[in-house]
Image: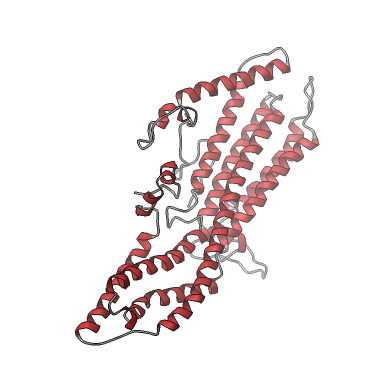
Amino acid sequence: MGPTNGYYDELHIRHPFLMVFFYSGTVWPLVLPYCCFNVFLLTALTVLKNYWNISISILPQGHALMSLLIAYLGVSKVNLAYERYMSAQIATGHAFLILRELHQLSITMTENFENAEAIEWRRDTRQTIIQLVHETVTALRDGKHAAALARNVGYRLGEGIDGSKVLNSRGGIHHYEDPMILVHALRSHLYNESAKIFKGGDGVPELQLLERCKMIDLLHEFTVSYRNLVRLASSPLPFVLVQMGRTFIFIWTLTIPLVLTGADFVQEYPSAFFFVILLTYGFLGLEFLSRMLSNPFGDEIKNDLNVRGMGTAAIIGIKEDAGLSEMNNLQGNRSTATNATTGSLRGIVQKRQESIRKSARHARLDSGRKVDAVDEYSANSFKYCEMDESAGNADGFPVVFS
């Protein structure tokens, strides 16, 4: 057993040595074959030395000097990979949170308009933002897709700078798979269409220029995060650095048995076997760790960023915000704006308090923890749903997952 999707709970923190014995979600599945190979090689060299007096070894001094270069390359790659991983995590969360905030702002600034055109405008805004989340997740989960969007690497239809047509056997990607095209359409919808629809009248003020610019600013913040995400998804670590570091680490690690069969370890076979496993796990583990962290959007390991889950959470939040707005609009006529705001907010708080009181049952799903007073207010009672990869989404927009 092990932590799910790279996350571990309070149980692992309270019992730190429990984490040492986890297998799933660690680098052990990748490193263990090499540990077994080094143990087998050390055993074969020991048998040759003891029974046939054949000694195969290398100078420990040369191997030790090489370890200086190995340490520098290994630590540098891990640092670069960790920086990429954290940057991807921050930018992904920021991008989806900004889209939800944009949807909330579009509702708040136009909720006084209740005509058919205003309702249609808000619905189109919600559907476009949800589709933008889908297309962003699609672009991030496919490195070739991201590379085509960022650098037109042989997969995108159209004319290049040299005027040549670009089309390969996969058929290329089309304009509707580029999230920036949707961003452009949404920007025009927020700025131009809103000016035509929300003109004011009958005691309702029109949508001001600064209000429209605020929505455009939030959309710009999303494009900044999206640009960083595409850069990370389409630009791996430099090939020369990866190749050089991997070559030296594998040569150094797989020659450890040749050092441990020297004259200094003739009478220390148990410790030799122990250290060959430990050193193989340590150095190759760092190499595989850097490979994992350098590709945070891939599906290779359980420690990848759950971009699909983050997108799902954003879509659920957007739909809940829309449902709350529709519920408030159905409450009927109210006397004054102050009473309307106070009554609406009071109703929301009361419903959420009731939801939290009923949510303690979710804490009992964790058999490893005891439900206490804190747990009664720590869960969420909303149903969880997934992005649909096989059909269109609930709002009628096609899902472009590949």
On screen, residue 71 versus residue 329, left or right, reads: left
Q: Position of residue 136 (x, y in %)?
A: 57, 49
Q: Position of residue 295 (x, y in %)?
A: 50, 59
Q: Position of residue 169 (x, y in %)?
A: 48, 65
| Quarter of image, res 367 | top left
Question: Residue drawn 69% across and 26% down?
Answer: 111
On screen, residue 347 versus residue 280, left or right, reads: right
378 vs 397, nearest the viewer: 378
| Quarter of image, res 237 | bottom right
Question: Residue drawn 53% across and 35% down?
Answer: 316
Question: Residue drawn 32% across and 78% down?
Answer: 265
Q: Is residue 249 visible?
A: yes
Q: Position of residue 328 (x, y in %)?
A: 62, 21
Above or below for 278 versus 112: below
194 vs 69, nearest the viewer: 69
Q: Is residue 242 visible?
A: no
Question: Residue drawn 50% across and 76% down?
Answer: 68
On screen, residue 209 versus residue 130, left or right, reads: right
376 vs 295, nearest the viewer: 376
Above or below for 260 versus 346: below
On screen, residue 242 versus residue 281, left or right, reads: right
| Quarter of image, res 231 | bottom right
Above or below for 56 versus 85: below
